[in-house]
Structures are given as C-alpha cells and as structure tokens.
Image (cartoon, rainbow, N blue to C red):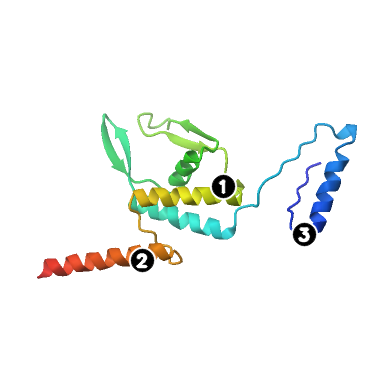
Amino acid sequence: MTAEIVLTWPGDFERAHKWIDACRDPKRLGSRVRFDGPQRTPDQNRKMWPMLTDISRQARIAVERGGSWVMIQRTPEWWKLWFMYQLKMEVEHVRDPYDPDGPAMFIADTSTSRLDKEAFSDLIELIYQFGARASVIWSDPNDVEAVRARAAMLAERERVKRSKGK
C-alpha cells in the first residue's frame, strides 16, 4: 500500500497517526514512513525560471576548448542543473559522447519539483547570490531591487549616450 497525506487540517494529523499506529502490526514491519517539508509554491517556481533566463542571457561560463579557455552562454535548463549541483543535490557528471572534449554535463536525479519550500528557497537565494556576483540585472517586475537596478542601469546608459553626443 502506498499512501500520502498532506497535513492541512486537524483530521489529517489524526489519520496519519492511525496509519503509523497500524504499522505496529508485525505484518507491517518494514513499512517506510517519510516526512517532507511543505512542497514548493507556484510563486517560487514562477520566480525561478525568469531568474534562470536572466542568467542565461547575461552570464557566461569559462570552458576549455582545444587547449584554450572560452566564455560560452548556457541555457536556463543547464543553469538550473548547475545550481542544483551547487546545492549538493543528487547529480552525476558525464561527458557528451559526441563531444568528449567539451564541458561535462550534469544529470540530476532530483527534480526541482521535489524540493520542499525551504530547499527551493535556498535554491532561489543561491541564484540571487550568483546573479549579484555576475552583475545580472533581474527582469522580474515584482522584484523591487531588480527594478531599481534596471532603472539605474538604463539611466546610466542614457547619460553616457548623451555625453557622447555632446
């Protein structure tokens, strides 16, 4: 039997308690019980993908190609796996069989959809930290700091443009 309860009201706690009590039966020995934190929210997920897109458009990563280092752009999906790796999730390094001298790929065993709120929050914070170091300007209109930074950047570009025109 496989069952799951999301604890949202008092009756759920009572039902979970009954299930655990039922496991005292010797026939149930070996049953598994797992406690996960609250699942990530849709708002967290909606925040992640624009952030990864901003990074993929603005940040570059150094890779060795043919004995020299080059800066390349990566996809949002690649950045997601890279950040998951940084969080020490279950990730495996493999080489592309069609480009063995190319960069290592990451294969994640843990999907972001399985992250709980706390782990997903850690992921978002890690993305913010990287973005700050890489001078990424966030496009999320709900991010007040991003809006201010973008406005300052655009104002500076306009000021430089005007000063060149004089």
Residues 37 and 63: in front is 37
Amino acid tagged 3: Trp
Label 2 close to label 3 by CB (< 8 Å): no
- Residue at image coords 50%, 48%: 123
Residue occupied by mark 2: 148
CA gap, disc 1 and disc 3: 24 Å
Label 1 close to label 2 by CB (< 8 Å): no
Establish if 87 lies above or below 113.
Answer: above
Establish if 126 lies above or below 95.
Answer: below
Quick one: SS at disc 1?
A: helix
- Residue at image coords 72%, 41%: 34
Residues 50 and 166: in front is 166
Residue 10: percent from left, percent from top: 80, 58
Amino acid tagged 1: Ala
Residue occupied by mark 3: 9
Residue 91: percent from left, percent from top: 52, 35
- Residue at image coords 66%, 48%: 37
- Residue at image coords 46%, 44%: 83
**Disc on the earlier residue, 2 or 3:** 3
